[in-house]
């Protein structure tokens, strides 16, 4: 008989809402709002089990996203991102028991919030931004390592990846497709250390099975919205999402 991690209806609502938001974000709309997935699930279940459930859902979303954005990703950026992300995942696995969850949340929150506030200051013409340049390859690689590292523990690689990619000023569709491929790579290689750390219990698998049908539907909605929103508003939503998600992580990390 199937047994689940989530028992009461209210907790199921939170879990479904979290998966839905992550899926829409995975479709390329809403930027790093996908980082709220694990916190929403953690309302009902321990965070390590929430992360394992979400990893299964994320892989389903990634596969859907790759088909939805087929061929639009930037190979040049991926050549910088993927090897660095692999290094970050390895570092995350090796330090799994060394860093507390709260320390990671505070670190990610500070990085993402600082970067987003900086962008909004420039966007609102509070300071002169006439000399802004596109960062080089090592900027991208460094933040990709951070994204792989933070993604391993709490699936919070979104803010560091935005720090790496948003300054490159890619077209919205190219940006969305590149992030989909990035996280597909990262999430697939995370399966092996998660399995090694015995994170995939039968309850985790059955809970993910129930949530799975919502994953492709939410991703397709994100793709639909991305293709119908102007580039300016796309980036406004992304950076607003970065403020919200990073601020939430910072508050959770400092108060729990």
Image (cartoon, helix red, strand yellow):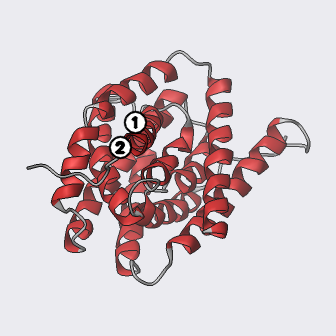
Mark found first going from the N terminus, 2 or 1:
1
Q: Residues within 10 Å of mark 2 (few under 14, many from 20)?
A: many
On screen, residue 95 versus residue 253, left or right, reads left
Question: Quarter-wise, where is residue 50 in the image?
Answer: bottom left
On screen, residue 58 versus residue 2, left or right, reads right
Secondary structure, mark 2, is helix
Percent coordinates x, y for residue 190 in the rendering: 29, 62
On screen, residue 19 versus residue 160, left or right, reads left
Query: Can the viewer see residue 171?
Result: yes
Q: Nearer the viewer, residue 182 or 10?
A: 10
Give yes or no for contact between labels 2 and 1 (Cβ–Cβ under 8 Å): yes
* Residue on which disc 2 sits: 181
* Residue on which disc 1 sits: 73
Mark pair 2, 1: CA separation: 7 Å
x 56%, y 71%: residue = 102
x 60%, y 43%: residue = 166
Residue furthest to the front: 8
On screen, residue 126 versus residue 88, left or right, reads right
Name above or below for residue 42 compared with residue 150: above
Percent coordinates x, y for residue 251 in the rendering: 67, 60
Residue furthest to the left: 1
Percent coordinates x, y for residue 128 in the rendering: 90, 43
Question: Quarter-wise, where is residue 85 in the image?
Answer: bottom left
Secondary structure, mark 1, is loop
Quarter of the image for the C terminus: give it.
bottom right
Percent coordinates x, y for residue 57 in the rendering: 30, 44
x 36%, y 80%: residue = 94
Q: Nearer the viewer, residue 94 or 138?
A: 94
Question: Quarter-wise, where is residue 154 in the image?
Answer: bottom left
Query: Can the viewer see residue 84?
Result: no
């Amino acid at each position: 008989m199937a047994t689940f991690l989530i028992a009461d209806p209210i907790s199921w609502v939170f879990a479904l809402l979290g998966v839905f938001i992550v899926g829409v974000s995975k479709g390329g709309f809403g930027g790093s709002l996908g980082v709220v997935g694990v916190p929403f699930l953690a309302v009902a279940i321990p965070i390590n089990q929430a992360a394992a459930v979400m990893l299964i859902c994320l892989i389903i979303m990634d596969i859907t996203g790759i088909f939805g954005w087929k061929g639009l990703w930037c190979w040049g950026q991926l050549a910088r991102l993927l090897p660095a992300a692999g290094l970050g995942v390895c570092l995350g696995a090796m330090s799994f028991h060394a860093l507390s969850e709260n320390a990671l949340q505070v670190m990610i929150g500070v990085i993402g919030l600082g970067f987003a506030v900086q962008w909004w200051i420039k966007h609102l013409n509070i300071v002169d931004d006439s000399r802004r340049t596109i960062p080089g390859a090592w900027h991208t690689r460094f933040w990709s390592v951070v994204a792989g590292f933070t993604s391993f523990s709490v699936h919070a690689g979104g803010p560091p990846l935005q720090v790496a990619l948003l300054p490159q000023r890619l077209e919205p569709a190219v940006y969305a497709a590149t992030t989909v491929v990035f996280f597909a790579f990262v999430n697939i290689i995370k399966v092996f250390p998660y399995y090694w750390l015995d994170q995939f219990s039968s309850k985790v698998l059955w809970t993910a099975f129930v949530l799975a049908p919502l994953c492709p539907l939410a991703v397709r909605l994100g793709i639909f919205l991305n293709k119908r929103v102007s580039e300016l508003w796309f980036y406004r939503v992304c950076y607003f999402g970065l403020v919200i998600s990073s601020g939430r992580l910072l508050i959770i990390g400092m108060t729990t």
